[in-house]
Amino acid sequence: MRLYLIRHPRTVAPSQVCYGSSDVQVADHEREMCLRELLADASLPAGLPVYSSPLLRCAELAYELAAAWGVSPPMIDARLSEMHFGDWELLDWAHIPRAEIDAWAADMAGFRPGKGECVLDMARRVLAFRSDMAVRGEDACVVCHAGTIRLLAAAGKSTNLHDVAEMAAGTPARVGYGQLIVITI
């Protein structure tokens, strides 16, 4: 089975702001442009069931994509949410103490940025979603976040939770806004 993973459109949050699980908006023109490009993409089969993170930057696009395809509304699943950065949420990266960023860099999978969620926690919930999808056995479209996509992609190389978390944490964030990535389970 295939999962067609779509990163949400660019948000209105400034690039220097840490906004993991915060519900930041997407400008209408960004969402509309992303939807147009996805509907025109021949590699994205129309009519798939749609799953989405509950965060608006994903859910709004997922609802519009499902409506354009004439399928049921998206299934909202909190396990697809981006990592929760605790006290770092909505702070400028420049205002986060350097010692905390260094501590995170020293233990990317286990450190809890801002006393929030660690990559291992996120990997546990994302892999539970992946496991449920494997049981369903049907292709699906998933609108989510770069961190979620990196974890789902890493799970194709290992099923060990720690390995997946380490691989995803060590992967540079090179998933573009609105980008489609296809993985096979």
Image: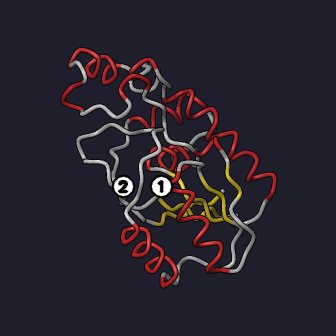
Q: Residue furthest right?
A: 135
Residue sitting nearer the eye, 156 or 29: 29
Left or right, residue 56 beside residue 97: right
Left or right, residue 181 beside residue 184: left
Position in image of residue 134 (x %, y %): 75, 53
Residue sitting nearer the eye, 107 or 38: 38
Quadrant where the C terminus lies?
bottom right
Q: Which mark is residue 72?
A: none
Disc with the residue nearer the chain's start (1 vs 2):
2
Q: Which residue is mark 1?
A: 57
Marks 1 and 2, Cα distance to the nearest angstrom?
Answer: 7 Å
Q: Residues within 10 Å of mark 2 (few under 14, many from 20)?
A: some
Amino acid at circle 2: Thr
Secondary element under disc 1, as helix, strand or loop, is helix
Q: Quadrant of residue 59?
A: bottom right
Q: How many numbered marks are there?
A: 2
**In the image, what residue occupies the spot 32% across and 54% down?**
12
**In the image, what residue occupies the spot 55% across and 43% down?**
81
**In the image, what residue occupies the spot 53% across and 65% down?**
61
Amino acid at circle 1: Arg
Position in image of residue 52 (x %, y %): 61, 55
Quadrant where the N terminus lies?
bottom right
Q: Residues within 10 Å of mark 1 (few under 14, many from 20)?
A: many
Whether pointer 1 and pointer 2 mark residues with C-beta atoms closer than 8 Å, the reply is yes
**In the image, what residue occupies the spot 78% across and 60% down?**
137
Secondary element under disc 2, as helix, strand or loop, is loop
Left or right, residue 83 beside residue 176: right
Q: Quadrant of residue 45?
A: bottom right
Q: Which residue is mark 2?
A: 11
Left or right, residue 165 beside residue 142: left
The relative height of residue 11 versus residue 119 in the rendered view (above or below) is below
